[in-house]
Amino acid sequence: MEARATTWSIRDRMLTTADHTLIMGILNVTPDSFSDGGRFESIDAAVAHGIEMAEEGADIVDVGGESTRPGAEPVPEADEIDRVVPVVGRLVEQGIVVSVDTTKPAVAAAAVDAGAHIVNDVTALRNPEMARICAETGVGVVLMHMQGDPATMQDDPSYENVLTEVAEFLEERAAAALTHGIEPKGICIDPGIGFGKAFAHNLELLHNVDWLATSGYPVLVGASRKRFLGEILRSAGEETDPDERDPATAATVALAIAGGASVLRVHNVGHAFQAARTADAIVRASLRRL
């Protein structure tokens, strides 16, 4: 294990993993997200939870107004803006680094106007208008791999070589981002755990985070509470609901850090914080003289 410090330029500041791996807290302002849908639909509840996550150790709060769970239905643009933008603005006022999780250029533009620092796009800026907005505003971007779309992505995901195909896709999307004027230091890549992936694909990607990290871009891993963790636990004789999978998520956090991940996207920040800081100390021990 070897710690590799990375930096990520996000608008007016630079995030670094020199001291610790970054934690991105998930704030779903939705009625139908797979784990916490409906819990933070009101603006006040969402803002309070975002502040709580920052106090628990989140370096970034990722605000999303449209579920991307398998089979999710699209949300009208205006509704998504109404859900997301007030929350983004109030969290930014609290000095919190905020990411907006959206595929819609208009939503991204409104959130950035409200102060968002990062655009987290599960379609990896395939819409040129989204790429233009990100380039002109200098926000950080997360480029994620997804096979298919949320409505169909888990119907029958298939790859000849999942590692090669995911890496090639992310390399191509990063190159496309550069042609639109996005700075290399503003790009973070995400292999898209659970997005158009079968059980074995998720395990293969998590086992090879170190290989993805050789791209030179920060790698974000988002395995929190996902279905494949439930499958692992089921095979061990334990049935779990998504919000019962935080200990399993902690294992993915520690292993992703050992593989060189820069950002961990999680639901339970307090739980992940302990796992991350412990893994950070162990991985970074090689850099210290004990």
Image (tube, helix red, strand yellow):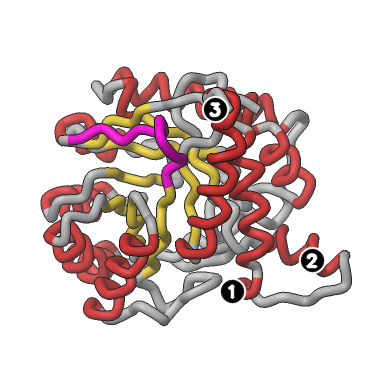
Q: Give me the C-alpha separation between circle 1 and circle 2.
A: 13 Å
Going 58% across and 28% down the picture, which residue do you hit? 290
Going 41% across and 35% down the picture, which residue do you hit? 19
Q: Which picture quadrant has residue 142?
A: top left
The numbered disc on residue 3 is 3
Mark 1: few, some, or many residues within 10 Å (few <14, many ≥20)? Answer: some
Chain-order first, disc 1 or disc 3: 3
x and y, in percent, of residue 63 in the image: 33, 60
Q: Give me the C-alpha separation between circle 3 and circle 2.
A: 30 Å
Q: Is residue 219 left or right of residue 24?
A: right
The numbered disc on residue 243 is 1
x and y, in percent, of residue 131 in the image: 28, 34
Q: Quadrant of the N terminus?
A: top right
Q: Is residue 102 left or right of residue 219?
A: left
x and y, in percent, of residue 135 in the image: 22, 30
Q: Give me the C-alpha separation between circle 1 and circle 3.
A: 30 Å
Residue at image mark 2:
233
Going 16% across and 61% down the picture, which residue do you hit? 94
Residue type, numbered disc 2:
Leu
Chain-order first, disc 3 or disc 2: 3
Going 39% across and 45% down the picture, which residue do you hit? 121
**In contact (CB < 8 Å): disc 1 and disc 3:** no
- Please provide the residue range marked out in magenta: 13-22
**Residue 228 within the magenta-colored segment of the rendering:** no
Confirm whether residue 175 shows in the render. Answer: yes
Mark 2: few, some, or many residues within 10 Å (few <14, many ≥20)? Answer: some
Secondary structure under badge 2?
helix
Residue type, numbered disc 3:
Ala
Q: Nearer the viewer, mark 1 or mark 3?
A: 3
- Tell which of 141 and 283 is nearer to you: 283
Residue type, numbered disc 1:
Asp
